[in-house]
Amino acid sequence: MEIDVLTTEDIIRKFFGIEKKLKIFNAEIRGFSIFLLDSGNISSFLNVYYNLGHQGFGGYNLSKHNSLVDWINGILQITKKTKVEDVKVNQIIRILVHDGLIKAIGAPIEDEWFCPAYLYDTVKDLK
């Protein structure tokens, strides 16, 4: 199952409004994990390194709706992989940072982005 990929313009228009506040960086994947929280909910992080340091993308409650499936599909589509175990450490992606937080991950060359806030209309739906 594929999800709709977004363009940078889609993300700016729907969620952030002012392009000047957005920063796009190249980033290196340092880890990808899916785990069970003490609460019994499922969560996930894609850990990246970029010129401002290390940061995680994720941490949402993925036990709701089809969240886990959508999350995994989004990561796989951006990294151009077909299996979770093929998401490699040291793989280069792009990240879109707004107010110091990673809001979306992007393919390294194509203008394709995975933005959970766009997918669920608001990140509050995932928390």
Image (tube, rainbow, N blue to C red):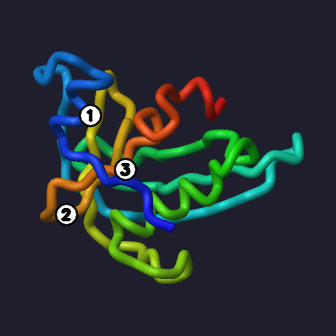
Amino acid type, label 3: Phe
Tag 3–tag 2 contact (CB < 8 Å): no
SS under mark 2: loop
Say whether residue 84 is left or right of residue 34.
left
Q: Residues under labels 1 and 3: Cα distance?
A: 9 Å
> Which label lies toward us, 3 or 2?
3
SS under mark 1: helix
Q: Is residue 82 above or below residue 4?
A: below
Counting other residues with Cα less than 10 Å from the Cα at mark 2, is it few (<14), some (14-19), or many (20 or more)?
A: some
Q: Give the residue number, with chain letter if any, for mark 3.
A: 114
Residue 12 coordinates in the image, percent (x, y): 21, 28
Q: Which residue is pictured at 15% across the width and 62% down the height? A: 110
Q: Which residue is pictured at 63% across the width and 48% down the height? A: 67
Label located before the other in sequence (3 or 2): 2
Which corner quadrant holds the C terminus? top right
Q: Quadrant of residue 81?
A: bottom left
Amino acid type, label 1: Ile
Label located before the other in sequence (1 or 3): 1
Q: Which residue is pictured at 45% across the width and 33% down the height? A: 117
Q: Is residue 100 above or below residue 42?
A: above
Say whether residue 26 is left or right of residue 30.
left
Report the residue that reaches farthest toward the top: 18
Q: Give the residue number, with chain letter if any, for mark 2.
A: 108
Q: Give the residue number, with chain letter if any, for mark 1.
A: 11
Q: Is residue 16 above or below residue 59?
A: above
Q: Residues under labels 3 and 2: Cα distance?
A: 12 Å
